């Protein structure tokens, strides 16, 4: 459930919005039934607000977009991958704090 600064990526938009983006892109791989994903959601929202205009933040529902999850080897959720210029710059598996996510984005800006 994306908020104002959190986009929702899917198979139709992933290449254009994530891999072709000029800014770093933080992607939260999640599922509706995943309790740790729900716990991480406010952190993702905070990071999106903090980096508005500097980075793109979005989510991929792995149940609706299994081909993307398989392509990036998502075996546990939540998993957060930060893409930069179409490449994986950083990957976090499990609950991650705002400071670590923000530091990873700052490194790319």
Image (cartoon, rainbow, N blue to C red):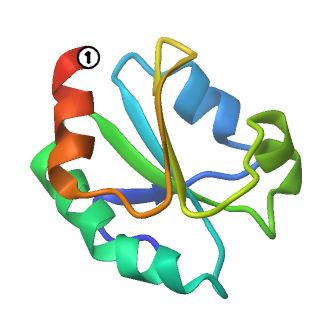
In the image, residue 105 above or below residue 41? above
Mark 1 lies on a secondary structure that is helix
Disc 1 crowd, CA 10 A, few/some/many (<14, 14-19, 20+): few
Work out which quarter of the rendered image holds the C terminus and state it: top left
Which quarter of the picture shows residue 12?
Answer: top right
Question: Which residue is rendered at x = 57% and y = 16% of the image?
Answer: 86
The answer to whether residue 109 of the structure is visible from this angle is no
Query: In the rendering, at what x and y percent does residue 80 appear?
Result: 49, 48
In the image, residue 42 above or below residue 103? below
Q: Is residue 43 left or right of residue 92?
A: left
Q: Is residue 47 left or right of residue 63?
A: left
Query: In the rendering, at what x and y percent does residue 42 appear?
Result: 27, 74
In the image, residue 82 above or below residue 21? below
Q: Is residue 76 left or right of residue 36?
A: right
Q: Is residue 107 left or right of residue 30?
A: left
Query: In the rendering, at what x and y percent does residue 97 appear?
Result: 24, 58
User: Residue 58 or 4: which is nearer the viewer?
Assistant: 58
Question: Which residue is rendered at x = 66% and y = 74% of the image?
Answer: 31
The answer to whether residue 13 of the structure is visible from this angle is yes
User: Residue 93 or 2: which is nearer the viewer?
Assistant: 93
Question: Which residue is rendered at x = 61% and y = 82% of the image?
Answer: 34
Q: Which residue is mark 1?
A: 108
Query: In the rendering, at what x and y percent does residue 99 appear?
Result: 14, 48
**Callout count:** 1
Question: Which residue is rendered at x = 49% and y = 78% of the image?
Answer: 36
């Amino acid at each position: 459930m994306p908020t104002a600064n959190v986009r929702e990526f899917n198979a139709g938009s992933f290449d254009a919005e994530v891999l072709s983006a000029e800014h770093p892109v933080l992607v939260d791989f999640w599922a509706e039934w995943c309790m740790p994903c729900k716990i991480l959601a406010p952190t993702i929202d905070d990071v999106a607000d903090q980096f508005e205009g500097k980075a793109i933040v979005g989510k991929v529902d792995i149940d609706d977009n299994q081909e993307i999850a398989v392509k990036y080897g998502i075996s546990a959720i939540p998993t957060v991958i930060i893409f930069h210029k179409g490449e994986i710059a950083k990957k976090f598996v499990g609950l991650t704090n705002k400071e670590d996510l923000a530091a990873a984005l700052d490194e790319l800006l």
